[in-house]
């Protein structure tokens, strides 16, 4: 009788422990479900949306915000719209958020961008110099580079252009915008279109595929500073495996 009592209360104790542990774990697994901003790509590890997903669902520094239903990546001095995320290639396509604004000029909104070292690299990069505050009159050879964006204008020259030095001498403001790595030569016909086409960055965080393929959702333990695989039973270090304790209790039943 007493043996039965002890074993049944022990059993109840384990059941409580188990259900508490798994409801906590299920919470992390559930809260890391991919989300989006209303438009744009599905957001999951290493990215997370501030306010919609917990920071442990992503990797430190890979935070996005939603603005007007667009996912925005804030890099030093500039905001970019995340157009596409190729998780399997660990790369993403961005374009400058300045082109979203319909009312005023987009040129003054564009600043020099420095990529956070070790976080992202350019996959395709051509520097497009945007010269503004130019002293009139401009020589004819520079006039052909005149582009406008909304209510403002600048001279747009790719970074290999022979006239770069001329433009630097004539204009006070020189901003380099990353654009797709094509024809780093010639003139830009439509600045908005070139900016809107965007460019591609890659990243190198932990590979999520083993976790995802085993039915888990990737995340990050900020305290231990380590990758986590959130599984329906509990967090694992790499991928989901059948919970042994769980199986034991079930089979004992
Ligand atoms: C992404 O990877 C797939 C297969 O690994 C490849 O076919 C595709 O071209 C890649 N896309 C880009 C943009 O690199
Ligand atoms: C450049 O183009 C804009 C609009 O097209 C125009 O307002 C501006 O005067 C032009 N600048 C020069 C130096 O021609
Ligand atoms: C932007 O970067 C370019 C190239 O590095 C530099 O020449 C220019 O002075 C910078 N502009 C500003 C406003 O810092
Ligand atoms: C620049 O353009 C000219 C004429 O379109 C072409 O002959 C030349 O090869 C190009 N240079 C580069 C570096 O792309
Ligand atoms: C981006 O891809 C290049 C070429 O595959 C690689 O050398 C580089 O390390 C990658 N950068 C990051 C931050 O993952």
Image (tube, rainbow, N blue to C red):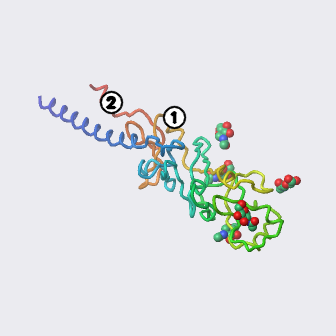
> Residue 79: horizontal and vertical position, in percent?
56, 58
* Callout 2: SS: helix
Residue in the foreground of this view, choosing between 19 and 81: 81
Which of the labelled discs sits on residue 61, or is there none?
Answer: none
Query: Earlier along the polypeptide chain: callout 2 or callout 1?
Result: 1
Quarter residue 170 falls in: bottom right
**Residue under pointer 2:** 248
> Residue 134: horizontal and vertical position, in percent?
72, 71
Residue in the foreground of this view, choosing between 142 and 220: 142
Judge from the rendering whether residue 2 lies leftward or rightward of residue 127; answer left or right: left
Judge from the rendering whether residue 189 lies leftward or rightward of residue 64; answer left or right: right
In percent of the image, x 60 and y 55: which residue is there? 99
In percent of the image, x 15 and y 31: which residue is there? 3
* Callout 1: SS: helix
Question: Which quadrant: the C terminus?
Answer: top left
> Residue 45: horizontal and vertical position, in percent?
50, 45
Q: Is residue 112 above or below residue 213?
A: below
Residue in the foreground of this view, choosing between 7 and 185: 185
In percent of the image, x 71 and y 53: which residue is there? 190
Judge from the rendering whether residue 9 lies leftward or rightward of residue 247; answer left or right: left
Q: Ligand 4 is found in which quarter of the picture?
A: bottom right
Looking at the image, is mark 2 or mark 1 nearer the viewer?
1
Q: CA distance from mark 2 to mark 1?
A: 25 Å
Question: Which quadrant: the N terminus?
Answer: top left
Q: Is residue 122 above or below residue 138?
A: above
Residue 77 visible in the displayed image: yes
Residue in the foreground of this view, choosing between 134 and 157: 134
Judge from the rendering whether residue 53 lies leftward or rightward of residue 21; answer left or right: right
Q: Is residue 191 above or below residue 168?
A: above
Residue 155 visible in the displayed image: no
**Residue under pointer 1:** 213
> Residue 245: horizontal and vertical position, in percent?
34, 34
């Amino acid at each position: 009788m007493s043996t039965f009592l002890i074993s049944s209360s022990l059993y109840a104790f384990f059941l409580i422990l188990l259900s508490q542990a798994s409801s906590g774990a299920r919470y992390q697994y559930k809260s890391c479900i991919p989300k989006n901003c209303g438009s744009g790509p599905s957001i999951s590890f290493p990215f997370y949306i501030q306010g919609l997903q917990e920071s442990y669902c992503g990797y430190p520094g890979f935070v996005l915000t939603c603005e007007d239903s667009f996912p925005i990546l804030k890099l030093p001095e500039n905001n970019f719209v995340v157009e596409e995320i190729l998780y399997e290639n660990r790369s993403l396509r961005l374009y400058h958020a300045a082109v979203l604004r319909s009312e005023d000029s987009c040129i003054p909104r564009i600043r020099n961008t420095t990529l956070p070292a070790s976080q992202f690299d350019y996959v395709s990069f051509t520097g497009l110099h945007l010269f503004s505050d130019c002293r009139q009159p401009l020589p004819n050879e520079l006039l052909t580079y005149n582009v406008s964006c909304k209510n403002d204008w600048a001279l747009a020259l790719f970074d290999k252009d022979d006239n770069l030095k001329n433009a630097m001498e004539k204009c006070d403001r020189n901003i380099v915008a990353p654009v797709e790595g094509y024809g780093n030569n010639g003139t830009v016909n439509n600045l908005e279109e070139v900016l809107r086409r965007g460019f591609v960055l890659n990243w190198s965080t932990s590979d999520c595929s083993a976790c995802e393929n085993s039915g888990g959702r990737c995340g990050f333990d900020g305290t231990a500073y380590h990758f986590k695989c959130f599984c329906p039973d509990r967090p694992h270090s790499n991928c989901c495996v059948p919970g042994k304790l769980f199986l034991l209790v079930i089979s004992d039943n």
